[in-house]
C-alpha cells in the first residue's frame, strides 16, 4: 500500500494530512526535508500551533520522524523531517 493510500485511510485529522502532503512535496528522494514551522504555517494557511499538532499526530501514527537540529552556536534551527514508509514512486 502506498503512503498516500495509508494516510487517506487513516483516522488522522485533516491538519496532519495537510502537513504530510506539504512535507512530502518538499522531501528529497530519501524522504527528508527541513522546512521551518513558520514557513509551513504561512504556506498552509494554518497557525503554527496547528502545524505542530499535525506534526505530533504524524509522529504518533508512525508516518514521520522528527529530529531537532541546532546551529554551530547551539541556536535552534529548523527540524529535520523524515517521512517513514514513503513510496518511492512519486
Image (cartoon, rainbow, N blue to C red):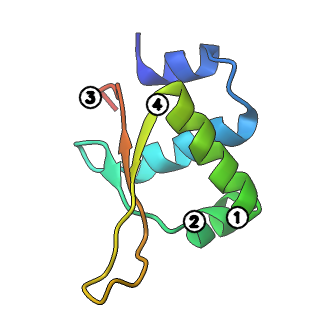
For the residue pair 29 and 52, the one nearer the viewer reads as 52
Q: Which mark is residue 48?
A: 1
Of the two numbered discs 3 and 4 on the same chain, state the one appearing first in sequence: 4
Q: CA distance from mark 3 to mark 4?
A: 15 Å
Q: Position of residue 13 (x, y in %)?
A: 74, 31
Residue under pointer 2: 37
Q: In the displayed structure, would residue 70 be above or below residue 45? A: below
User: Can you give x and y, in whole percent of width and height, for residue 63 in the image?
Assistant: 46, 31
Q: Is residue 90 left or right of residue 15?
A: left
- Secondary structure at badge 1 equals helix
Compare marks 2 and 3 and give the one earlier in the sequence: 2
**Of 52 and 21, the residue lying toward us:** 52
* Residue 60 left/right relative to 14: left
Q: Label 1 vs label 4: CA separation?
A: 20 Å
Q: How many marks?
A: 4
Closer to the chain start, of discs 2 and 1, is 2
Q: Secondary structure at mark 3?
A: loop
Circle 4 crowding by C-alpha within 10 Å: few under 14, some 14–19, many from 20 = some
Q: Which residue is mark 3?
A: 88
Q: Describe residue 69's horizontal placement relative to residue 3 as left or right.
A: left
Left or right, 66 with reference to 43: left
Identify which residue, 44 or 62, lies in the foreground: 62
Amino acid at each position: 500500500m502506498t503512503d498516500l493510500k495509508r494516510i487517506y485511510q487513516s483516522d488522522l485529522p485533516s491538519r496532519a494530512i495537510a502537513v504530510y502532503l506539504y512535507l512530502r512535496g518538499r522531501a528529497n528522494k530519501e524522504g527528508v526535508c527541513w522546512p521551518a514551522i513558520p514557513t509551513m504555517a504561512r504556506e498552509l494557511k494554518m497557525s503554527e500551533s496547528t502545524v505542530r499538532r499535525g506534526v505530533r499526530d504524524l509522529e504518533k501514527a508512525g508516518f514521520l520522524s522528527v529530529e531537532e537540529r541546532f546551529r554551530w552556536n547551539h541556536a535552534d534551527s529548523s527540524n529535520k523531517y523524515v517521512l517513514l514508509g514513503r513510496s518511492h514512486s512519486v
